[in-house]
Image (tube, coloured by chain):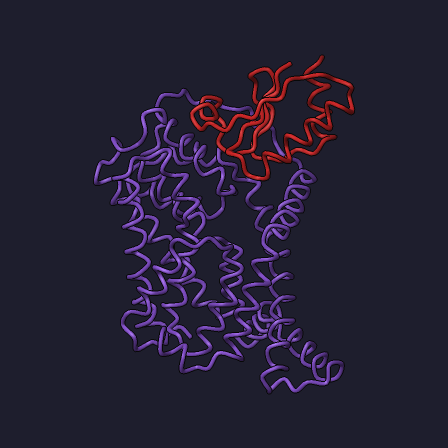
Amino acid sequence: MIIKILGSGCKKCTTLAENTKEALADLGMEAQIIKVTDFSEIAAFGVMSTPALAIDETVVSSGKVLKANEITGILERTKR
Amino acid sequence: MIVFEWLNDQLLKMQWLSDLVKLLVGNVFGLDTTQRLGGSIHFFIYDTIKIFILLSVLIFVISYIQSFFPPERTRKILGRFNGITANILGALLGTVTPFCSCSSIPLFIGFTNAGLPLGVTFSFLISSPLVDLASVLLLASIFNWKIALAYVVVGVLLAVTAGTIISKLKMEKYVEPFVFSNKVHEIAQSELTKKDRIDFSTEQVLGIVKKVWLYILIGVGIGAAIHNWIPQDIITAVLGQDKWYSVLLATFVGVPMYADIFGTLPIAEALVAKGVGLGTALSFMMAVTALSLPSIIMLKKVVKSKLLITFIGIVTGGIIIIGYAFNAFGSFLM
């Protein structure tokens, strides 16, 4: 599973990345987390508000700093 | 009318808070509020508390409204209109669409990809930081409703005019090519429940307070200093109403600065109380919020220098004109 954090590098994106790591740890899941800061790449996802979260190239959230428990919910839904 | 004035005084100006703090400073600290030290401490405590209360309430209410207007919806709405109507709508929606400045570039790209005219996107980008609903209400609390309304009208006008000029100049060719090269992805928008909206609004309040509390304290501190410590003559010597360059000075100092608008409000309030023209103070506020070095650096990544300079020039010029206008006619609004 490849998780991408989309954002230009402000504090929100860092927090989202930390929360994602926490969520993965809570679920005992392993995934590669990549921080995408390049605008053309972010644009390619069609994302208009950062920070955004993408799992395996699909955007699951945009414009929100998800909390760890919200991310675990999404991860579990994605696994199914 | 009297009821409205009372509401304005109590809810927005929080006269009761001012009186309460006066009692605090007078009886608990034993200071005379008409004297310098007592006066500045009163101003500091009262203004800080007032701004934080207003901030929290306003951000909550406005975020709730904003939860109905995510960027994706705004883009859809704007796509249906043409010409100057689109610019006007872009400017108006800019005030209610939530986004933090780090989203301005993805938003710019998203709008442009969807085929929205460059001018409409710029109208949106200009009005968004400039006419911030919460700060407009804060303006009403510090000055009065007429000034707050005039600020909104002028801000929207500036956004629409600047956007229209940019459209007319046909500067699309100055946008970086990669901006156009993407397809528009419609990300599935799930409907928000009432609880979702309340959660969102609460998060916004906490997030923004965390981000700006220091700016507010600094702003109120500077405001208190101006209010009570810096002699009127020095201020009017530099920024007085009769000085023709005061608006220019205020604007050029404000443009490269980045500070949250909530921090600039107490400074504007104190300056005006010391005899600085309303227009000069507003120019300073607008310059700080509409343009800043960080946002210009970010814009540079998506537009070429010529368009960037045009954008900065038009907005700065507009702010200066507005400043002079408010200085000339502001007395009718006070």
- For residue B141, above or below residue B181: below
Whether residue B280 is situated above or below residue B318 in the rendered picture = below
Q: Quadrant of residue B228?
A: bottom right
Chain coloured purple in this rendering? B
Image coordinates of residue A31 in percent, x first then y, are 67, 17
Q: The red chain is which one?
A: A
Could you tell me residue A46's position as x and y percent?
Answer: 47, 24
**Residue displayed at 73% across by 81% down:** B29
Using residue B168 as the reference point, say whether residue B75 is left or right of it: right
Q: Could you tell me which residue is drawn at 52 percent across and 70 percent down?
A: B223
Q: Classify B56 as above or below B202.
A: below
Could you say which quadrant of the image residue A65 lies in?
top right
Residue B201 x, y percent position in the rendering: 64, 45
Q: Name the residue at 29% across, 48% down.
A: B162
Name the foreground residue: B239 vs B278.
Answer: B239
Image quarter of residue B8: bottom right
Picture residue at 75% right of the left edge, 84% below the top: B27
Q: Quadrant of the C terminus of chain B?
A: bottom left
